[in-house]
């Protein structure tokens, strides 16, 4: 009998690839809110793809690696992230096996 092997997140991430658009589908709407009103910067924690990275005074958004999970639509305590689906043919591509 074959034993089912559990995959780590890193192994699962090898099963996806990305066809990134040139324009971001994610927008931090007000940089001042991040800088002055959001000490925890929780988007840098809840995003499973580590898209949000705080760089001293601004949020860098590495939209190319977004997994389109939708968490940032509800996770930002200030509703400061505008999230749209990537344009057709762009974004994450799931591969099985
Ligand atoms: S959680 Fe929202 S307000 Fe806070 S740093 Fe991230 S985008 Fe800015
Ligand atoms: S949709 Fe998910 S993966 Fe994409 S930026 Fe938001 S939290 Fe990260």
Image (cartoon, helix red, strand yellow):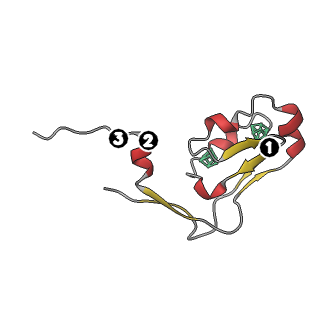
Q: Residue at x 26, y 39 (%)?
A: 5
Q: Which mark is residue 9?
A: 2
Would residue 35 appear left or right of 48 to someone viewing this image?
Answer: right
Image quarter where the C terminus lies is bottom left
For disc 1, does the CB lie below 8 Å from ligand 1? yes
CA separation in Å, label 3 and label 2: 7 Å
The single residue placed furthest to the top in the displayed view is: 40
State the image coordinates of residue 11 (x, y, percent, origin top left).
Answer: 39, 46
Where's ligand 1: which quadrant? top right
Would residue 5 appear left or right of 78 to someone viewing this image?
Answer: left
Q: Which residue is mark 1?
A: 80
State the image coordinates of residue 47 (x, y, percent, origin top left).
Answer: 61, 41
For disc 2, does the CB lie below 8 Å from ligand 2? no
The single residue placed furthest to the left in the displayed view is: 1
Using the image, determine if residue 49 lies above or below residue 92. above
Q: Secondary structure at mark 1?
A: loop
Point out the frontmost of discs 2 and 1. 2
Q: Secondary structure at mark 3?
A: loop
CA separation in Å, label 2 and label 1: 27 Å
State the image coordinates of residue 6 (x, y, percent, origin top left).
Answer: 31, 37
Verify CB contact (< 8 Å) between mark 3 and mark 2: yes
Would residue 96 appear left or right of 36 to someone viewing this image?
Answer: left
Q: Which mark is residue 33?
A: none
Image quarter where the N terminus lies is top left
Tell which circle, 2 or 1, labels the residue nearer the N-terminal end: 2
Using the image, determine if residue 57 lies above or below residue 26. above
Using the image, determine if residue 93 lies above or below residue 71. below
Q: Residue at x 64, y 34 (%)?
A: 45
Q: Which mark is residue 7?
A: 3
Q: Residue at x 76, y 33 (%)?
A: 77
Q: Secondary structure at mark 2?
A: helix
């Amino acid at each position: 009998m074959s034993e089912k092997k559990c995959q780590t997140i890193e192994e699962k991430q090898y099963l996806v690839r990305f066809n990134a658009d040139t324009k971001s589908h994610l927008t931090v709407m007000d940089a001042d809110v991040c800088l002055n009103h959001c000490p925890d910067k929780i988007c840098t924690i809840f995003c499973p793809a580590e898209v949000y990275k705080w760089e001293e005074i601004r949020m860098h958004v590495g939209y190319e690696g977004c997994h389109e999970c939708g968490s940032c639509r509800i996770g930002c305590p200030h509703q400061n992230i505008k999230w749209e689906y990537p344009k057709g043919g762009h974004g994450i591509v799931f591969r099985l096996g």
